Image: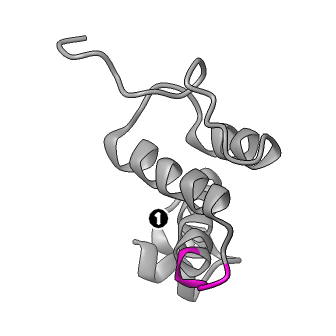
Amino acid sequence: MSCCVKTHPLAPERCGATKLEVEEILFAAKVAAELARKDLPEWKRNCIETYVQCMEDHWTGSCYDCFRNCEGQTGEWPDNKCRPKKKGG
């Protein structure tokens, strides 16, 4: 689905994607491009890498909102809002 969305970002219904899914896919592509930059500040790299882990491991909270918060705090991830799910819960 992500390849289809990247090809047709203005027509997600062609891919069977919701608007939210499209936003997440396109944001993930932007994040990957940012990580490839050699001049990326370490604090921003930390925010991005934590965001990726949050998305991949399906943490509690909104990974996107926590990423934006991390950017605003220059590298401080809001652990009280986004964190790994408890084991067995």
Q: Which is more toward the observer, 41 or 33? A: 41
Would you say 70 lies left or right of 26 here? right
Q: How many other residues sit within 10 Å of disc 1, few (<14), some (14-19) or many (≥20)?
A: few
Q: Quadrant of the C terminus?
A: top left
Q: Quadrant of the N terminus?
A: bottom left
Would you say 18 lies left or right of 88 here? right
Q: Which is more toward the observer, 12 or 21? A: 21
**Magenta stretch, overall SS:** loop
Residue at far left of view: 88
Q: Is residue 79 magenta-colored?
A: no
Q: Let me know if residue 78 appears in the view.
A: yes
**Disc 1 residue type?**
Gly
Q: Residue at x 46, y 25 (%)?
A: 60
Q: Which residues are magenta?
A: 35-39
- The residue beneath circle 1 is 16
Q: Position of residue 38 (x, y in %)?
A: 59, 85
Q: Position of residue 4 (x, y in %)?
A: 46, 81
Taking 46 as reference, is 16 above or below it? below
Residue at far right of view: 72
Q: Let me know if residue 21 appears in the view.
A: no
